[in-house]
Every structure is written in C-alpha cells, then in structure tokens.
Amino acid sequence: MSARPEPRPGVMKIDAYVPGKSAAAGVAKVHKLSSNETPLGPSPKAVEAVRNTDHLELYPDGSATRLREAIAAKYGLDPSRIVCGAGSDELLSLIAYAYVGPGDEGIFSQHGFLVYRIAILAAGGTPVVAEEKNHRTDVDAILAKVTERTKIVFLANPNNPTGTYIPFDEVKRLHAGLPSHVVLVLDAAYAEYVRRNDYEAGLELVATAENVVMTRTFSKIYGLASLRIGWMVAPAHIAEAVNRIRGPFNMNGPAMAAGIAAVQDEAHVAKAVEHNEQWLEWLTKEIGSLGLTVTPSVANFLMITFPDEPGRTAKDADAFLSGRGLILRRIDAYGLPHALRLTVGGEEANRLVVEALRDFMKGGSDA
Ligand SMILES: *Cc1c(COP(=O)(O)O)cnc(C)c1O
C-alpha cells in the first residue's frame, strides 16, 4: 500500500503539453509565430457576438443546439451527429476515454500531433507509433501496427508540425485496411487551408462508415483559439457515447455565440485562405533559397530544417530569431530537434522572418 494517492499507471508517463512561447526576453515588439494562430484575427461579427452575450449568471445550453445547427447548415450535416467541445483537444481526449482502456492500443504517426499520445495514455491505453516516410503519414506503416488490441487510430491531415498531407484515396485505403471495430479519428484542424484537388477532409467517409470520426476546430482559420471551440461529426452511436462522458456544460455561452457568427462569415474565411495561399508560397520559396530545407506544406505553417552544424542549428536559429522578437516553435518534443515550425504571419512578420533567417545563415550576429 502506498502512503499517498497514486495516479493510474499511464498518467506519470505523460509529458505535459508545452504550448508555443509567446514572449522573448528584452524584446519590446514580438511576433508570435509559434502556435498556428491566424494573423487576420477572428471575424468582427464573432467579436461582436461575444460583446453582446449577456446573462452570464445562467448556465449555457448544454447541448450547444444552435451552434451545432449552424455548423450542420454550413456543411450539410445532421446536427444530431455533431458534438461540440472546448477545443477539439477536449474531443480527442473524450473519444479516447470512450474507446480506449488498459491493455488497448492507439496508433498515430511518428511526428503526429502530441495530444494523441497524451489522450491515449490518460485513458489508460498504450501509444503505438507508426514510422513516417519523408515526414508524411505512411498508411502501410500504420496498418502494419494494427493488432487485436488496437482500438483507435489518430490521423492529423494535414499533420502538425510537418504540414504534409495524404490524399483522400490514401485515407480511404487506411480505412479499408482497418478492422471495423477500430475508431479512425480524422483530425482536420487545418482542412480549410488546403488547396489540393486530391485532398478531402473526409466528411463522406464519416457519413458512410460506422467507425470514422472527424474533428474540426475554430482555433485556426476562424481565429478563435482563446474561446476554445471544437466540434466532431461521427456516426450516431459514437456521438452518443461521447455525449455520455462529456461535461454537461462543456461549451460556454460567449464561445457558442462567437462560433455561430464565425461559421456564417464565409467572406472572412475566404480572406484568410487567400492570405495564406500567397504567403505560404512566398515563405517557402524565400526560405528555401537561403539554403534551408522547407518541407512542402498545405497548412498555415511550415517546417524548416536547419543544418546540424555548430552555430547553424535549429536551437541557434531559435535564439537568433527570438532576439529579434520572432517567436517560432521548437519541435524537439515531436522528435524533430533539427527543425523549427513557422506559422504564416502577417506581411510585416513574414518579411522580418526571411530577413532574419538570411542574416542568420550569413553568420550575422545581433549580439
Ligand atoms: C491546433 C490543432 C488542434 C486544435 O486544437 P483546439 O483544441 O481545437 O484549439 C487539433 N489538432 C491539431 C493537429 C492541431 O494542430
């Protein structure tokens, strides 16, 4: 018998999630390019909706009916199959709690989103990692890891932090290869940004299969990360299971009001897509021309790999850029110690990053 309470075994194996930095010591003006937030901010209509929320003394609608209806109307879905969460992170955890327990395995890819490992361990399960090829999800590697203990597969498409994606044909091949009792979670946090004919977020698969769930978020292109709004669409039986274990009032009133306004402001989303298309291409070209390796990205961020030479490493670059108030994301925790992740920012920030990286590669020092 232990002298004090001990958490369940998996809990102490979790490395707590460390968010991107938001400040740099001794620098007045900071450009935060470390958390894939949008430089355009939220729709003004969403901000207005938050300001207009009153009656904070009343509990919110526990089933998020109006928000689910607004999402359903936009995507042509059945609202009863939608569940909202405090960010899609909450939903990823709830899906794991509902389907994974001690002795069960959950699979995700080598450089997949860190929340998957946390969700599987917290639920008591065992995380299983499938190797990637060229920083891209490898469907065959995932299928090779499936055992009779597998209960869940998490796929971020596009993936964070690599920015790569797999075509919908590959997603369908993954689904076809999984046993029907395994839940396939398609995390489409960056779907709105993707401009590729062979990409689909996967709504069609969710509608026709009994074991596929898609999660989406208002934190990225909608610019509402602070309010914590995510949603999932699933077969009725999975939505029902998640509804049983979620907190009865997991969505707050101001967040739901903002979400409804945001999802209806298509012009704002279109502007964000256009901005991203232009600057993602520009950053990829400019940074690539400095002798750095940029992994082709379809999202609103890109992964830059640095040489493994003294003075030129990702860690050195991070320190150099921070000195100029440019905060990128170290991704050692993802097994990518030689790379930094850069969020596409506004024009000023993007130009400053390229200028700083040029000076860094020339061996310049601000010290
Ligand atoms: C940002 C992100 C999320 C969304 O997180 P929220 O909890 O909705 O803010 C989910 N998955 C991936 C891969 C992400 O990068």
Image (cartoon, grey):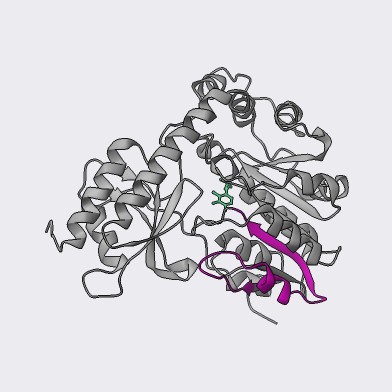
Q: Position of residue 221 (x, y in %)?
A: 52, 37
How far from the left and from the top, in percent, is residue 15? 53, 68
Q: Can see residue 145? A: no
Residue visible at 47% across and 45% down?
300
Rendered view: 47 above or below 212 = above
Q: Is residue 271 left or right of residue 23?
A: right
Which quadrant of the figure contains the N terminus? Answer: bottom right
Residue beneath the point at 88% across and 49% down: 237
Q: Is residue 193 above or below residue 338?
A: above
Query: Which residue occupies the extreme bottom position in the image?
Result: 1
Counting labels gives 0
Q: Is residue 37 visible?
A: yes
Nearest to the observer: residue 205 or residue 221: 205
Tell me residue 207's x, y (percent). 82, 44
State the residue in front, 93 or 76. 76
> Which picture quadrant has residue 118?
bottom right
Left or right: residue 56 compared with residue 211 = left
Q: Is residue 146 magenta?
A: yes
Give the position of the C terminus as an image quadrant.
Answer: bottom left
Residues in magenta, as a range: 129-157
Q: Is residue 45 left or right of residue 130?
A: left
Q: Nearer the viewer, residue 130 or 165?
A: 165
* In this view, 26 is above or below 9: above
Q: Is residue 199 magenta?
A: no
Q: Position of residue 214 (x, y in %)?
A: 71, 48
Residue lying at 35% horizontally and 37% vertically, measured from the top left: 346
